[in-house]
Amino acid sequence: MIREIVRDPVFLAQKSLPATRDDLETARDLVDTLRHHKDGCVGLAANMIGVLKRVIAFDNDGEYMVMLNPEIVKASGVYEAEEGCLSLSGIRKTKRYKSIKVKYETERLEPRWRTFTGWTAEIIQHEIDHCSGIII
């Protein structure tokens, strides 16, 4: 289901709780909402659709990918980026890493560890910040 985008910075600044099996519908809604906004959005976190759970969805080289409880466990290659956000107007500067290793759970709740680089790594970092209540 396509969900409305939350634009309230007070809500977005709250930390999300760990995701469980009960949050799989939220994961599907994230992908539906991301597809709907594909022309101006490459990633979403659950709080952006009003759910304070650690679930993200993003464009991974043309395929949508979902992560539950994502956590960056290793990062290297700091650089300065400028990012926009569907929930907020404008562009902001932030620091990002060129390469990140992420620990997460699949939609089947299977644990995974995977390394991402470049643009995809930047998207994931932005969405994980959302889960932590960090507004970029």
Image (cartoon, rainbow, N blue to C red):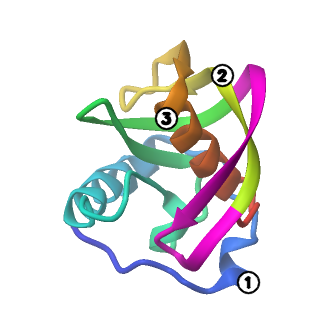
Q: In this rendering, is residue 33 above or below 72?
A: below
Q: Secondary structure at mark 2?
A: strand
**Residue 76, image quadrant:** top right
Q: Amino acid at mark 3?
A: Trp
Can you identify the residue that label 2 sits on?
Answer: 100
Tell me if I can see residue 131 in this picture.
no
Q: In this rendering, is residue 76 above or below 27?
A: above
Q: Secondary structure at mark 1?
A: helix
CA–CA distance between discs 2 and 1?
28 Å
Which comes sooner in the sequence, label 2 or label 1? 1
Residue visible at 24% across and 62% down in the picture: 39
Can you identify the residue that label 3 sits on?
Answer: 119
Residue visible at 51% across and 47% down in the picture: 55
Which comes sooner in the sequence, label 3 or label 2? 2
Residue 3 drawn at (x, y percent): 32, 74
Q: Is residue 21 left or right of residue 39?
A: right
Tell me if I can see residue 69 in this picture.
yes
Q: In this rendering, is residue 96 above or below 29?
A: above
Q: Amino acid at mark 2?
A: Ile
Residue 128: image tag? none
Residue visible at 37% across and 60% down in the picture: 41
**What range of the chain is rendered magenta?**
72-92
Q: Are marks 3 and 2 in contact (CB under 8 Å)?
A: no
Q: Secondary structure at mark 3?
A: helix
By secondary structure, the bulk of the magenta-drawn segment is best described as strand
Can you identify the residue that label 1 sits on?
Answer: 10
